[in-house]
């Protein structure tokens, strides 16, 4: 039942700001009041422009505002990247695109070392 | 405001304060961070009370998925009001059970003891203490009321926050509460 992190923290940020859902909707460019509650209740995910607008309004990065979603995506993508790396390593060195495979593996290793350095 | 590195693993708690015609709630994420707070009206006939309270509490349980719901064990009200409190608390208990969330009741004595230690021996003194800890609530602090005035609308929120804080201090995260109090300016003792 219990999820580690909430999908987003939009409601918390709005409550702290003191803005109403209607006021926030107007700032985001919505005419009605319906969209903001849907985002806050995790019923729908906002489009990219609106997510960036939230970032501008609250002065917090999108990855922080949508912490749960960011966390889920990160886990999924890291799994896919690991699978891709395994696949590339399994390919024969005699393949015609050996240089291209080597470049991709090098990039994956660079990326991993950068991820490790991240706080 | 929310640092991803600080997000606790299993620390979400819903604290509820029940009155005869309204509920105050506070959602904590760890003892130091409030996610949501508010007052829900359940001003309806006693016959429909169970249904109305369940309808008010269910979205909070579904949205925040807390690991526990905490309430105050004892409310010393008149016998007529106690029926409504019992029904409301029963409805909350049932909804929490349905969602697989445990219920904890905080006894009034440790709750009072906790705030007496901080210098709040009455409800109107506890509210500013809570507001010092959580500045989001500071706008809702009410001055001390006269005996013939009715209770402030937002007082239930402070009562719920107090219950949640005591639950963390007594059981779930005593270290976190100590840290929160130590880091709050107004609780720091001047150097001797």
Image (cartoon, rainbow, N blue to C red):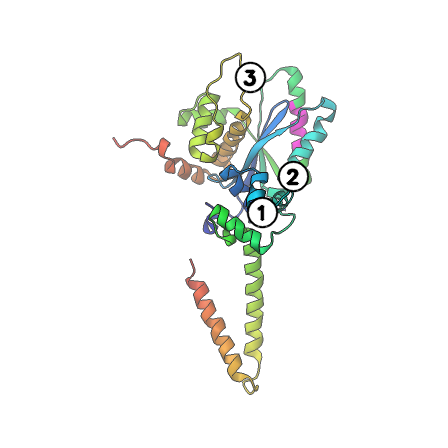
Q: Can marks 1 and 2 be said to lie on one chain?
A: no
Residue contact at pointers 1 and 2, CB within 8 angstroms: no
User: Which residue position holds label 1?
Assistant: A29
Dot in front, 3 or 1: 1
Q: For the point 60% across and 17% down, which residue is it? A: B77
Write down the chain letter for disc 2: B
Q: For the point 62% across and 52% down, which residue is it? A: A45
What is the CA distance from the residue labelled 1 to the residue labelled 2? 27 Å
Instruction: Identify the secondary structure beneath mark 2.
Output: helix
Instruction: Identify the secondary structure beneath mark 3.
Output: loop
Residue B111, percent from left and from top:
49, 27
Characterize the local packing of mark 2: few (<14), some (14-19) or many (20 or more) Cα atoms within 10 angstroms: few
Vertical placement of residue A92 versus B149, above or below: below
Residue A41, percent from left and from top:
62, 44
User: Which residue position holds label 3?
Assistant: B150
Q: Which residues are magenta?
A: B85-93
Q: Is residue B102 magenta?
A: no
Dot in front, 1 or 2: 1
Q: Quadrant of residue B53?
A: top right
Q: Name the magenta segment's main secondary structure.
A: helix
What is the CA distance from the residue labelled 3 to the residue labelled 2? 29 Å
* Residue furthest to the left: B192
């Amino acid at each position: 039942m219990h999820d580690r992190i909430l999908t987003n923290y939009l409601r918390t940020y709005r409550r702290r700001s003191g803005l109403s859902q209607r006021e926030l909707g107007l700032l985001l460019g919505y005419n009605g009041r319906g969209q903001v509650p849907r985002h806050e209740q995790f019923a729908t995910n906002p489009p990219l422009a609106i997510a960036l607008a939230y970032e501008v309004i609250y002065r917090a990065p999108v990855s922080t505002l949508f912490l749960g979603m960011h966390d889920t995506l990160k886990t999924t993508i890291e799994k896919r990247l690991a699978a891709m790396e395994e696949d590339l390593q399994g390919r024969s060195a005699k393949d015609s695109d050996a240089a291209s495979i080597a470049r991709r593996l090098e990039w994956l290793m660079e990326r991993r070392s950068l991820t490790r350095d991240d706080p | 405001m929310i640092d991803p590195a600080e997000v606790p693993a299993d620390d979400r708690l819903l604290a509820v304060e029940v009155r005869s015609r309204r509920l105050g709630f506070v959602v904590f994420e760890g003892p130091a961070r409030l996610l949501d707070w508010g007052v829900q009206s359940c001003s309806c006939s006693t016959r429909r009370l169970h249904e109305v309270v369940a309808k008010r509490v269910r979205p909070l349980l579904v949205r925040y998925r807390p690991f526990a719901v905490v309430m105050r064990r004892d409310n010393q009200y008149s016998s007529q009001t106690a029926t409504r409190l019992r029904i409301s608390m029963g409805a909350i208990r049932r909804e929490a059970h349905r969602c697989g969330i445990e219920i904890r009741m905080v006894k009034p004595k440790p709750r009072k003891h906790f705030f007496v230690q901080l210098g709040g021996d009455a409800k109107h003194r506890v509210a500013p203490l809570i507001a010092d800890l959580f500045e989001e609530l500071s706008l809702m602090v009410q001055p001390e009321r006269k005996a013939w005035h009715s209770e402030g609308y937002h007082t239930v929120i402070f009562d719920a926050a107090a219950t949640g804080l005591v639950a963390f201090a007594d059981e779930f995260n005593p270290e976190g509460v100590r840290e929160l109090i130590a880091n709050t300016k107004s609780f720091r003792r001047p150097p001797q």
